[in-house]
Image (cartoon, helix red, strand yellow):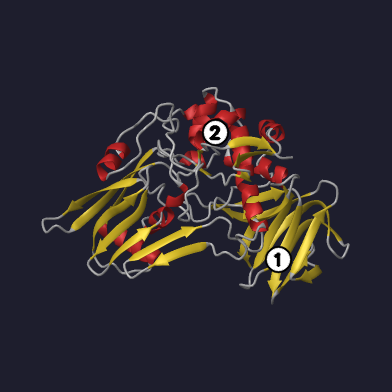
Amino acid sequence: MIKEEPRINVGVVEHAREIQGVFNGPFELPTSVRLEGAFTARLVGDRVVLFDNEGIEVMKGTEIVCRPLRSGTFTLKGVTIGINFHWERKEDQTFEGALCLLSSPDGSMTAINEISVENYLKSVISSEMSAEAPLELLKAHAITSRSWLVAMLEKQMRGKNVGAPALRTRETGSEVVRWYDREDHTSFDVCADDHCQRYQGITKIISSRAQEAIDVTRGSFLVHEEEICDARYYKACGGLTECFENVWEDTAVSYLQTVSDSEHPHPAIATETDARRWILSSPDAYCNTTDAEVLRQILPSFDQETADFFRWRIEYSREELERIVGKKSGIDFGTITDLVPMQRGPSGRIIRLKIVGTKKVIVVGKELEVRRWLSNSHLYSSAFVVDTERDRDGVPTRFTLRGAGWGHGVGLCQIGAAVMAARGKKAEEIVLHYFRGARVQRLY
């Protein structure tokens, strides 16, 4: 395990032909040229060309690294956040550390932020959580985020993920099973969006509470059997957390198994009857909260736009569902006649879903692929039951999905952890509730 603080490369902008920004203070290029103020980077052929605030070319190359002198920061214009989610938008973002502009093999350009792990984390905590969140929640989140990040870096150092594709696929004529790893980037360590961890630099003011959470937990990790834990998290489990192997690769991880998000244990979902009873109920759970004040304290403003995270409902006409599924899967199912859960995890999340059409019958999995195929963006989760309205001939006219939770459900439930903190639970107690069998250990 590590003994000192690493530095990381964060991919902030990908697949760009032009990037505009501002150096808020002097930055030095490899040629010893110093730049300050507005800049533009354009891809010309296979090289990045950097222009100053007067439009004068100052450098070109396949990689341009701009390092701050003293404590300078840089701003990038129109960074896309929430990519492919229902709240996707663009915003200007400001960052500490160095800026690397890199030409990519696909004929585009990437902007990368080089920064230390602890400075990165203070932004993650501020980006994922409101500045008014309880300190113990911020500390728990710092330990979780730090653990996931460095566990991923250590896997890379051992060569386990180098060159690994983002998408893992297992396909037959009647089944499509896909899952998406986080440790899949080749030009940088992590991206800045929810695919990895939400990172928005110092765009939002780093609160004194977030800084304290990072300082107090500095170098603290979740550890299991002398390895740093691959500590996953998401917004709301819906009352039960999910097992790692039901969302990603088919390997059980002992500290990422199902946990009741409550002081009182709930039985795991084992049958469709269990799933319907569970999802259509409102069980006691930490993340089962409608307390607007608590949610305001823990969720960034754009996450507060999602109010129905614990139990939710979405309706599609048959024609609308056919359009969405056809577009997202690339398969012509004909008339969709049924959505049939074939396998669920203990949280109620569907791992394999049979889509029955007059032209094609396909089983799709895992959790995220189910969510992708059944929504223009993503369903909140794959924990849902289906009610189907039919006409006199038995042909479906409307599908209603009633669901539970927001996210994949593996590891720490952010809203559940927030409620635990609001009720006086300490950071270590919170993380050990979700990561059973792990311990907290300071490594630097």
SS class of the residue under badge 2?
helix
Which of the marked residues, 1 or 2, is nearer the chain's N terminus? Answer: 1
Which is more toward the observer, 61 or 265?
265
Question: Looking at the image, is mark 1 or mark 2 nearer the viewer?
Answer: 2
Residue 280 % position (x, y): 29, 37
State the residue at coordinates (19%, 51%). Answer: 389
Residue at the farthest front position: 225
SS class of the residue under badge 1?
strand
Which is more toward the observer, 91 or 103?
103
Q: Is residue 106 left or right of residue 322?
A: right
Q: Mark 2, residues whose alpha carbon is within 10 Å: few (<14), some, or many (≥20)?
A: some
Quarter holding residue 128: top right
Residue 96 % position (x, y): 74, 48
Please, is residue 34 above or below residue 24 in the view?
below
Residue at the farthest right position: 32
State the residue at coordinates (54%, 53%). Answer: 195
Residue 424 % position (x, y): 55, 22
Residue named by callout 1: 102
Residue at the farthest top position: 424
Please, is residue 115 above or below residue 284 in the view?
below
State the residue at coordinates (43%, 54%). Answer: 368
State the residue at coordinates (66%, 63%). Answer: 187
Q: Which mark is residue 304?
A: none
Quarter holding residue 139: top right
Q: Is residue 27 left or right of residue 354?
A: right
Amino acid type shown at disc 2: Leu
Residue named by callout 2: 432
Amino acid type shown at disc 1: Leu
Which is more toward the observer, 247 or 131?
247
The span from disc 1 to disc 2 (Cα, nearest Å) is 40 Å
Q: Mark 1, residues whose alpha carbon is within 10 Å: few (<14), some, or many (≥20)?
A: many
